[in-house]
Image (tube, grey):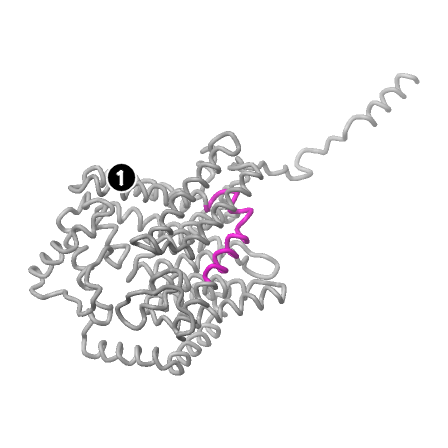
Amino acid sequence: MAKRRGAQAAARRRPAVAPEGAFPAAPRRGPVLVAPRGALLVVAILAVVLAGTSLAVDTSASAAFDAPKRAIALLGTALAGAVALFASGAAPSLARWSALSGLRRAALALAAAALVGALLSSLASPRRALSLDAMRSVVLMAALLPLGASDAVARGRAWLLGVFLSACAVNAVASILQGLGVYHPFALETAGSRQDTGAFAGNVGYLAIALAFASVAALGILLAARRPAVRVCGGAALALFAADLLVNRNLTALSAAVAGVAALLLARYRRRAALPLLGALIAAALLVAAYPPLRDRARTDWVLIRTGDWNALVSYRGGPWAAAVAMARERPLAGFGPGTFPAEYIPHRLSAEIRARRRFLSPMLTTSYGESHNDYLQAASDAGIPVALLALGAAGCLLAACARAVRVRESPGGTEPEPALLLAVLVAGAVAALTWFPLQRPITTVPLLLAAGRAWRVSGEREPAGAPSEAEA
């Protein structure tokens, strides 16, 4: 009897064991990239980078706008990367490679191969010293991709988005006041009436493209926010950014904003997006008709289209485009090396003119081009056609993975907002890269690469049925 009572007491003290399969096993967490304090520090550094690349100006520098922004971007990215790697005492593990979906694995592999190819192109460049100097900046800025995919950004993404939108709002207010002749923080020598509304960005094109991204983000907040105060803030920010886009009249930025808005509406509402898209197009047409400078610009562009003057329509970008094509034709495999386009522009534009038997001159004062005004062409001219195809493939796989995440990530209220927002921002960036160079200026490069890294991470947080998730790695 005593033995039986002792056994019963021991059984009561032992934890009950559930039958196998009665409860799902708790998911094992993947490797943590940074400790919580390290994550906070990484977010703080990236917030400074986002604000600095939008607002920093050094009037004593020869490049008063670009030089401080570039320095902040490079130093801040290097510091954030060092904290992310060493704050937890160990580098991130690669054990989850087997758990990546095909698209995300392809995007990662293609991007890494493109970076290695660009480095080889620098080593083989006829202007090796110049190219290797530029390649150091490329490698540092590429670190924004894993930072965007890190646990730190996952924890602080709302703060980073708020800093980016706030910096864009400051620039937008200053730009509008400049356009009205009320506020001129700097005495600038400019060419053309639209060149003095660049606010703290220093250039209307750079500012307008950043505002295009910010407009898409503000619309995403307006559509997804549940609290009325957040909706009001999102709507006010969207109105402010749209107003400054009208003031600057940059067609590349307007096209990028329209593409991003369309992608966002289609991602969130799918077939039901037809009516919102129609409303957005009608609103855009009414704004063009109501704002005289933009109406005059639209009328001029329509005349250029009817007369077939495509070079004037694209603001005389035919010269740098032709030079980039000529460079890719001359060195198709290795290119001339990253950072060499400014030095190679004039001779290759002349060779392109001889081949085409026409001139690619610009009547504007800004006839010297440091960029091809097309990131896709410049990737081919600088690093070679194979590297350009690798980078394009990586971007395509990332967009496809993000689009798939939009389809499969459903919440009780509909599609979860973050994948749709990231997809829309990346689409806006892809469109802007057709006639500009958002990946070559810190004010647009930093938010784009952080968004790309975050999109890669979000795309794997919930895979379609049958695919392994990161939690199962």
Magenta span covers which residues? 148-168
Report x, y in % for residue 95: 47, 32
Q: Main secondary structure of the magenta part?
A: helix
Task: Tell whether 432 sits left or right of 12.
Answer: left
From the viewer's perspective, is residue 426 above or below residue 340? below
From the viewer's perspective, is residue 358 above or below residue 294? above
Q: Residue furthest right?
A: 1
Report x, y in % for residue 376: 27, 54
Quadrant containing the N terminus in the rendered view: top right
Q: Given the image, on which type of amino acid does mark 1 rest?
A: Leu
Question: Of 188 and 432, which appears nearest the observer?
Answer: 188
Total number of numbered labels? 1
Image-quadrant location for residue 357: bottom left
Q: Is 152 a magenta residue?
A: yes
Task: Name the residue: 50% across, 47% down.
Answer: 463
Report x, y in % for residue 259: 39, 65
Question: Of 22 and 451, which appears nearest the observer?
Answer: 451
Task: Name the residue: 41% across, 45% down.
Answer: 144
State the residue position of label 1: 119
Task: Name the residue: 49% across, 71% down.
Answer: 239
Element at label 1: helix
From the viewer's perspective, is residue 181 above or below residue 447? below
